[in-house]
Image (cartoon, rainbow, N blue to C red):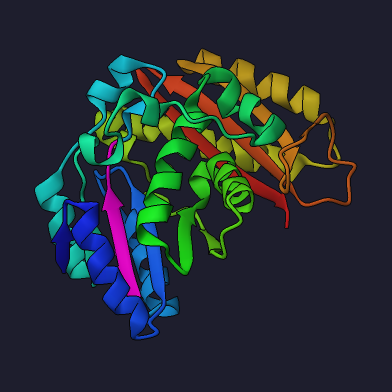
Amino acid sequence: MIVFKHSKYLRLYLGYIKRKGLSIGFVPTMGALHEGHLSLISQSRKNTDITICSIFVNPVQFNNKDDFQKYPSSIENDILLLEEAGCDILFMPEEQEIYPDDASKVKHFDIGLIENILEGKFRPGHFQGVCNVVEKLLKIIEPSHLFLGQKDYQQCLVISRLIQLLNLNIGISICPILREPVGLAMSSRNRRLNENERKNAAILYETLNNIRNKLPEENFLKLKQAAISDLENKGFKIDYLELAKSDDLEILENSNSNNSLILLIAAFLNEVRLIDNLMVKD
């Protein structure tokens, strides 16, 4: 695996790759890698000739500075995991490389209503920050294909919208959520949970499954109210629990729809914010 820290040299190398007619798969990450990330590397290796992963903790997408400072880091282990997974290239830039000045951090993208619902509602400015860094990474790497994880489903739709806005010819694969044995969706933030908290956090997935199994026979709003009450009694602070259309995340009050639907949840367990989702109709 070749490690690049400067976009200038990465572009030169990728130019050589592209002149050979090889396809490039890209997996953007913020590090603290786990099996979920490695599954994206695996999908890229199966479907493209060269796989590149980036590790960059993007300060612009954190509306909470404390959350940014506490974001886990394990660079040496990440590099080892990527090498073992067969990743070809790692791009690991410093902040100055991505954001040379303050003006480069505030470009605005018209991504529509999806920016201000669900995650966007509770994390103002988050998706503009995501778009800022992803645009820069895509322009540096110019991949053939992008591999993203379903756990960050709304972010996947935002990036799809961004690619449309930029008029880029890049394929997108949204890969399934990988889960810990207890059912908890794999996430870098899980490192901040102790063993008991990990077991408790798995209740979020159980809740989504219970709601899905009871739809459409029971009213979603009643199921939602009961689920939130139960989770709060178990120590969770709920940001949202919603049913939505999977193509645009239009929020729904019931499952009486022919569209593909998805359940989404975000909740705090102590100081750790967790998100999860589950398809209701594919």
> In the rendered image, which quarter is residue 235 located in?
top left
Q: Position of residue 277 (x, y in %)?
A: 58, 41
Residue at x 73%, y 42% (from the top left corner): 248
- The residue closer to the viewer here, 48 or 119, is 48
Can the viewer see residue 18 in this picture?
yes
Q: Is residue 20 left or right of residue 119?
A: left
Number of numbered discs = 0
**Relative to residue 228, is residue 206 depicted above or below?**
below
Among all residues in the image, which is located at the extreme left?
76
Secondary structure mainly formed by the magenta segment? strand
For the C terminus, the image quarter is bottom right
**Is 203 left or right of 121, judged from the image as shown?**
left
Residue 140 vertical placement versus 44 (above, below): above
- Up the image or down, 35 lies above or below 135; here it is below
Q: What residue is at 29 percent from the left and 24 percent from the top?
A: 68
Seen at 54% across and 15% down, the residue is: 232
Q: Which contiguous range is marked in magenta?
A: 50-57
98 or 249: which is nearer to us? 98
In this rendering, does residue 194 appear at all? no
Residue 56 in the magenta stretch? The answer is: yes
Q: Residue at x 36, y 77 (%)?
A: 18
On the image, the x and y values in percent for residue 261 come to 75, 46
Image quadrant occupied by the N terminus:
bottom left
Instruction: Please give left or right for residue 122 compared with residue 26 in the image.
Output: right
Q: Is residue 69 magenta?
A: no
Q: Nearer the viewer, residue 77 or 19?
A: 19
Between 192 and 222, the one nearer to me in the picture = 192
Residue 276 placed where, x, y %?
52, 38
The image position of residue 178, as x and y in percent, is 43, 54
